[in-house]
């Protein structure tokens, strides 16, 4: 196992050009109080079981700056097609996304799926772009310190050297190469202590999607660095080990083809992920898109109101959704959920008289589940008709109907 400890014990050559002294940096005016924000206020859509924030890269940067200013825990996940495939086959990986504080769409296929479903998710907010934008902020704004964890031997150190060689918005204060090992092995106390002792604002991982997300999930309460994200190839791009696809190829959704050219071993992953995408399009996305369009067509002929009823038995609150649970009713539903969260009780959603739930409302329910989980409470559903079960299945949300037992993966969807 090879590692480099925080900046103060590193060779000076690694950080040549980095100004770690001097006057206090200028902070951005009026930062958002990230710690006080509720997940219920996020604009989240459910895309095949994953929470996807409708957000652009500029807003992601602003959220990162606010979290750094407040030293507020801020877990970022960057879902792409490989994340989607892993979330279908690994419940713990899926939970790492559901527990995240921000999930901007990283992969073009995720944006394509969202468009097919008629969702207002129109652009990527890639992890690689995030590092570039943070570095491009320059030295006028508050400079953020970053710790690079993972990557092939020497890659994180090379990326640190390049980041610190030119004054910018990021200063690398430490790197670590844990080597090729399992999540438990790279979660030993001395490794976590070394990462934490850097005092960095941002912890960026490059361990492979599944291993990186699981490492962050299992060590969530042990880490003291506020901003955490697995950014994968972004560290390779920063180090100059791998060239990033030209902007035109990225715009056309062909970055995967460029990645295969640069890293030949990736062709199997892209092939397998592509097969899963084709199956999802035919068995999930298209049926859900047809159902959504049919519902939109029927708006003129059926009432679209949503009546929210509440009852309490002293141990849990039952919320009945009567009618159509759609984006139009998000403000009222959010207000209702926020009131019930104050009681810290389990919540039961009664769907006996619910005709439809759209992707935005499902996103709100996923955020309600996240808030309840953080309070040690649970979200369950009752009165789920066969028609409603079909909506949950097409949305890859069947796991919500039996939270105690992870839903088995459809063998026709995931190819190992």
Image (spheres, rainbow, N blue to C red):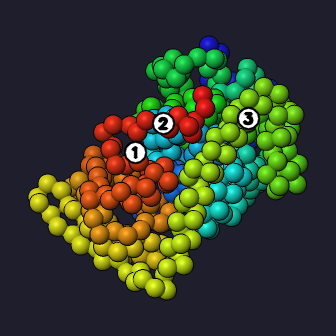
User: To which quarter of the image does residue 387 belong?
Assistant: bottom left
Which residue is drawn at the image coordinates 52% and 30% (left, top)? 215
Which residue is drawn at the image coordinates 66% and 22% (left, top)? 177
Which disc number belongs to residue 409? 2
Element under disc 3:
helix
The residue closer to the viewer here, 82 or 60, is: 82
* Spatial separation of the CA atoms under disc 3 and disc 2: 19 Å
- Label 1 neighbour load within 10 Å: few <14, some 14-19, many 20+: some
Label 3: which residue? 271
Q: Is residue 62 above or below residue 152?
A: below
Q: Earlier in the sequence, mark 1 or mark 3?
A: 3
**Numbered-mark total:** 3
Residue 130 visible from this viewpoint: no
Q: Is residue 300 left or right of residue 380?
A: right
Element under disc 2:
loop
Which residue is drawn at the image coordinates 83% and 28% (left, top)? 264
* Spatial separation of the CA atoms under disc 1 and disc 3: 27 Å
Q: Is residue 73 left or right of residue 207?
A: left
Label 1: which residue? 399
Residue 85 visible from this viewpoint: yes
* Spatial separation of the CA atoms under disc 2 and disc 1: 10 Å
Q: Quadrant of the C terminus?
A: top right
Q: Quadrant of the N terminus?
A: top right
Q: Nearer the viewer, mark 2 or mark 1?
A: 2
The location of residue 103, given as percent across then percent down, is 56, 52
Element under disc 1:
helix
Q: Is residue 262 above or below residue 306?
A: above
Which disc number belongs to residue 207? none
The residue closer to the viewer here, 28 or 412, is: 412
Which residue is drawn at the image coordinates 61% and 67% (left, top)? 118
Q: Earlier in the sequence, mark 3 or mark 2?
A: 3
């Amino acid at each position: 196992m090879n590692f480099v400890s925080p900046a103060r014990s590193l060779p000076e050559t690694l950080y040549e050009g980095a100004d770690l002294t001097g006057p206090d940096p200028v902070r951005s005016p009026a930062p958002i109080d990230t710690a006080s924000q509720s997940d219920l206020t996020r604009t989240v859509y459910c895309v095949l079981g994953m929470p996807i924030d409708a957000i652009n890269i500029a807003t992601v940067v602003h959220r990162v700056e606010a979290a750094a200013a407040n030293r507020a825990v801020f877990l970022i996940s960057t879902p792409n097609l490989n994340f989607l495939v892993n979330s279908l086959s690994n419940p713990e990986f899926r939970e790492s996304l559901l527990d995240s504080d921000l999930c901007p769409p990283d992969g073009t296929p995720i944006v394509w799926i969202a468009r097919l479903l008629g969702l207002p998710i129109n652009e990527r907010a890639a992890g690689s772009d995030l590092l570039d934008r943070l570095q491009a902020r320059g030295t006028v704004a508050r400079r953020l310190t970053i710790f690079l964890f993972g990557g092939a031997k020497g890659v994180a150190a090379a990326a640190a050297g390049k980041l610190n060689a030119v004054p910018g918005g990021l200063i690398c204060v430490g790197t670590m190469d844990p080597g090729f090992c399992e999540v438990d092995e790279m979660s030993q106390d001395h490794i976590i202590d070394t990462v934490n002792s850097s005092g960095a604002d941002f912890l960026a991982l490059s361990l492979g999607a599944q291993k990186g997300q699981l490492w962050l999930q299992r060590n969530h309460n042990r880490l003291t660095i506020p901003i955490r994200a697995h950014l994968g190839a972004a560290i390779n791009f920063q180090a100059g080990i791998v060239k990033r696809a030209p902007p035109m190829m990225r715009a056309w959704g062909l970055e995967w083809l460029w990645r295969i050219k640069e890293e030949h071993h990736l062709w199997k992953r892209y092939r397998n992920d592509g097969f899963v995408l084709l199956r999802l399009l035919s068995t999930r996305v298209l049926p859900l898109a047809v159902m959504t369009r049919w519902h939109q067509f029927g708006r003129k002929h059926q009432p679209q109101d949503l009546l929210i009823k509440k009852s309490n038995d002293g141990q849990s609150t039952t919320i009945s959704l009567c009618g159509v649970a759609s984006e139009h009713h998000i403000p009222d539903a959010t207000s209702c959920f926020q009131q019930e969260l104050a009681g810290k009780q389990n919540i039961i959603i009664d769907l006996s008289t619910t005709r439809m739930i759209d992707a935005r409302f499902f996103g709100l329910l996923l955020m309600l589940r996240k808030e309840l989980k953080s309070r040690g409470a649970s979200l369950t559903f009752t009165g789920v008709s066969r028609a409603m079960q079909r909506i949950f299945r097409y949305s890859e949300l069947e796991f919500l109907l039996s939270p105690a037992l992870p839903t088995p993966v459809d063998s026709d969807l995931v190819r190992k």
